[in-house]
Amino acid sequence: MSPCEGLLTWGRGVSLKQKINEQTKAAMKSREPLKVDCLRFISSAIKNKEIEKRGELDDVEISKVLATLAKQRGESIELYKKGGRLELVEKEEAELAIIQSFLPKPLSDEELAKAVAETIAEVGAAGPADMGKVMKAIGPKTAGRVDGKKVSEAVKAMLSGK
């Protein structure tokens, strides 16, 4: 059984937090230690963010936490590959697959460009000075679906007319 088999899909009326808890229980029953450890780590990261925020996280905020965890796994995979640590690469890739199964489908470059163009029109941005307004407005639309750096670069390019 692959690490992400049986995971629920995004947006079925059940919160992400509930899905993660359900999958943790299922992984414990089916005795999948890697999956259990990864899901517990995810739950811990969410709990830490809730403590930091002093309140419950909604699905958008949880997806941001998941996106951060996915990005960290991706960076670790690259470092382990450079270091020749293939056993750790496999572990990180399995964890990355579990984390990504809870995230919505990533935006393509075309979808990102369309979202940026729509947001620029919505906020009435005229140039690079309005980048902050655009970033604030587009943040919730792209949360967990594309890296913030990539969004920033796309916004900057459109606002500067490149």
Image (tube, rainbow, N blue to C red):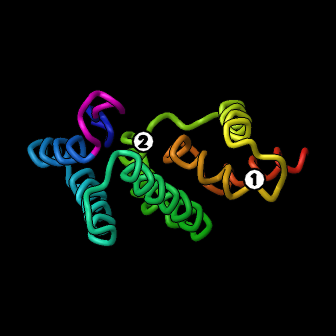
- The one nearer the camera, 143 or 136, is 136
Circle 2 — which element? loop
The amino acid sitting under disc 1 is Glu
Q: Position of residue 69 (x, y in %)?
A: 43, 59
Q: Quadrant of the C terminus?
A: top right
- Mark nearest the camera among 1 and 2 is 1
The residue at the point 76 percent across, 46 percent down is 125
Question: Picture coordinates of residue 79 (x, y %)?
Answer: 57, 67
Q: Foreground residue, 24 or 103? A: 103
| Residue 63 spot, x, y in % from top left | 41, 48
Earlier in the chain: of badge 1 and badge 2, it is 2
Question: How far across and how far down the image is residue 80, in percent?
Answer: 53, 66
Q: Nearer the viewer, residue 155 or 18?
A: 155
Residue 20 relative to residue 105: left or right? left
Q: Amino acid at mark 2?
A: Leu
- Residue span colored magenta: 8-16
Say which residue label 1 marks: 153
Q: Which residue occupies 33% across, 67% down?
A: 53
Q: What residue occupies the far right of the structure in this picture?
A: 162
Instruction: Please tell me which residue is depicted at 30% across the width and 60% down the height of the picture.
Output: 46
**Marker disc for residue 103:** 2
